[in-house]
Image: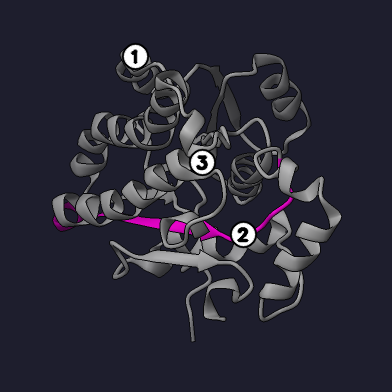
Amino acid sequence: MSSPSLFSVEGKIAVVTGASSGLGQGAASLLAAHGAQVVAIARRADTLAAWSEQTQGETAILAADLSDRSCLADVAAQAAKPFGAPDILINAAGINTRRPADEMTDADWDVTQNLNVAAPFFLAKSMVPGMRNRGWGRIINFASLQSRRAFANGISYGASKGAVEQMTRAMAETWSAHGITANALAPGFFHTELTAPVFADPELAARNAAQTCIGRNGQVRDMDGPMMFLCSAASDYVTGQILFVDGGYTAK
């Protein structure tokens, strides 16, 4: 029989990026509701403030543009001020410019790689020393269907998410001996700000739902169980893994 504390995050300090909307906000709300102290990071200060006011639990907010690599060390330092050095880092911030390959600009490419790849790594690098000192830590990155599959107008995003998958394994190889696990969640199609262009086309959204084994697209709550698993002691012996939460999209 499992211990009641096996999936607990109570008393843990969590930093969640991309927390102003979508799956990032869902993760931040989930952990706060289950007793973690949560520092929510995103660009939009007003949206973060509104979220914090209506969220149960201990929360703090930090507005920052994580695509600016020069600010990441300072962001990590600021994130430790409200509650202390974090136990859990959830790298949910991301961007998909959906720029066709033949129209790709330097700016589109750079912002995608900086936010989707560089920010998760450099934030983790800054937060690992505190985790190492405690002998326990959790890093959860966000991979994607595009870590494994090509989609139209996804060359920069797909490249970044392929990198996230391999980076997650490399993080695990580097830090797991110190009690710090690194894993990634790879969502299927969830209706969020990031995927709004997909869901704006009802026929496309329906085709994506039909591609799953379950027969529907994802809902934010579908991430709750996998997230709690990877953030808690339940996943102590799981590291370097990519968990697809896609309703069986990649099984067909």
Q: Position of residue 89 (x, y in %)?
A: 41, 41
* Disc assigned to residue 12: none
Colouring mode (rainbow / by chain / secondary structure / one colour): one colour
Does the image show residue 5?
Answer: no
Q: Quote the CA–CA distance across marks 2 and 1.
A: 30 Å
Disc 1 residue type (three-letter): Asp
Query: Over which residues does the magenta segment extend?
Result: 176-192
For the C terminus, the image quarter is: bottom right
Q: CA distance from mark 2 to mark 3?
A: 12 Å
Return the residue at label 3. 92
Q: Which mark is residue 74?
A: 1
Q: Callout 3 environment at 10 Å: few (<14), some (14 to 19), or many (20+)?
A: many
Element type at mark 2: helix
Amino acid identity at mark 2:
Met
The answer to whether marks 1 and 3 mark residues whose Cβ atoms lie closer than 8 Å is: no
Q: Residue at x 14, y 57 (%)?
A: 177
Q: Is the C-beta separation of discs 2 and 3 under 8 Å?
A: no
The stretch drawn in magenta includes residue 106:
no
Q: Amino acid at mark 3?
A: Ala
Q: Which residue is mark 2?
A: 223
**Viewer-side residue, 61 vs 12:** 61
Please state if 131 lies on the left or on the right of 41 as rendered. Answer: left
**Identity of the residue furthest to the bottom in this view:** 1
